[in-house]
Amino acid sequence: MALRVVEKTPALEDYTPLSEHQEQTPSTFFGGKPVLYARHGGLTLSAPGRKLQSHPAFARFSTSSTPSTVDGATAASGDVLIKDVEAWVNSEDLILFQQSPKPTGVSIPYPSIALHATMKWQSRVDALYMNLSLNDAEQVNDVDEIEVLEVTLLPLNFESADASSQNPIKEIFSAMNTCADLHPDPEASDSDPEFEDAEDDAPGAGGWITAENMHEFIDENGNFVGNGTLGAGAGSVRAREEDGANGADDNHESEERKWRRTE
C-alpha cells in the first residue's frame, strides 16, 4: 500500500466513534465504517523542506519557515512547518489534513509508518516523531530503494511556554499503537522461526497418516484415496520371521529360545 493524496476534508460521519464501537457487537466486521480512535486539530508538522517535495501528497501542503530559535533552542537547518493540521487516527489509516490555505491531506497506511515515538522537540515540548516510507512496499525490491521521510507532529501553541497544557501527543501516540496492531506486517509473520516450526510440526506435515489428518486420505464414503505424499517408510510391511516348518515345533522352539534368553 502507498501513501495517497486526500482532497476531501474528513467528516465525522465517515467514521464509527470509538465509544460506540466498544459498546456494539456487529454482525460482521467487513464493510463497516473505520473506527475513529483519536482526532485533534491545530497541530503542526515539522519536516525537511527539500524532502517534502519527493512525494506528491506532501508537496501539496503549504509550508512556512521554522523559526531559527524558540526559547533559545536552535531549529534544525532546512526544516519547514506545515501548520493548521488535523490528525485523524482511525482503524484504516492515519490522515494528516491541512485546512488552510488550501484543503489538502495525506492518507498514510500503518505499514508505511516504519517508526513512531514520542520525543522532546527542541528539548522542551512533547512531540510525535514518525519515520515514513514514501514507497509502495509491494513495488520495492531492494531496501536501498526505499525513500524515507522524517516528520514531527507538534501540539498547538508549541512555540509558547504553555505548550505542555492539554498536549494531545500522548493520546495520538497511544491510538496509533492500537491501530498499528490491527495491521501487522505479513512478511514479519512469514519469516518468524516460531511460525516455521509450527508449520513443520503441523499434523501430517511429515507425510504420515494420523488421526488429525485422516480426512485428507479418505473420501466421504470411507474409502482410502491416497492423496498427499507419505513419508519415508510409510506403507512398508515387515515380514514375519519363520522359525520352522511345523507350527507346533516352531512354537516349542520359540518358547525355548525365549527361556534361554531370560535365564
Image (cartoon, rainbow, N blue to C red):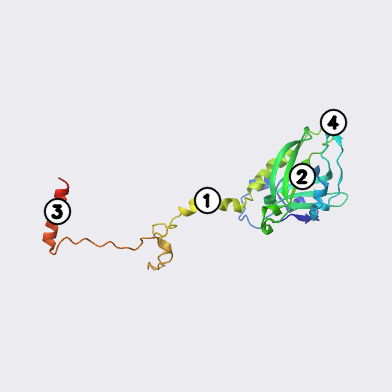
Q: Nearer the viewer, residue 116 or 32?
A: 116
Which residue is located at x 80 percent, y 49 percent? 51
Cα–Cα span, label 3 and label 1: 52 Å
Task: Please report whichever mark, 3 or 1, sits nearer to the chain's N-terminal start.
Answer: 1
Contact (CB < 8 A) between labels 3 and 4?
no
Mark 3: amino acid: Glu
Quarter holding residue 252: bottom left
Cα–Cα span, label 2 and label 4: 22 Å
Contact (CB < 8 A) between labels 1 and 2?
no
* x, y percent for residue 176: 69, 44
Contact (CB < 8 A) between labels 3 and 2?
no
Task: Please report whichever mark, 2 or 4, sits nearer to the chain's N-terminal start.
Answer: 4
Compared with 93, 243 (above or below) is: below
**Quadrant in the picture for the C terminus:** top left
Which residue is located at x 77 percent, y 42 percent? 153
Cα–Cα span, label 1 and label 2: 34 Å
Mark 3, residue position:
255
* x, y percent for residue 41: 80, 43
SS of the residue under disc 4? loop
* x, y percent for residue 170: 72, 38
Mark 1, residue position:
195
Question: Visible in this render: residue 178?
Answer: yes
Task: Please report whichever mark, 3 or 2, sits nearer to the chain's N-terminal start.
Answer: 2
Quarter holding residue 155: top right
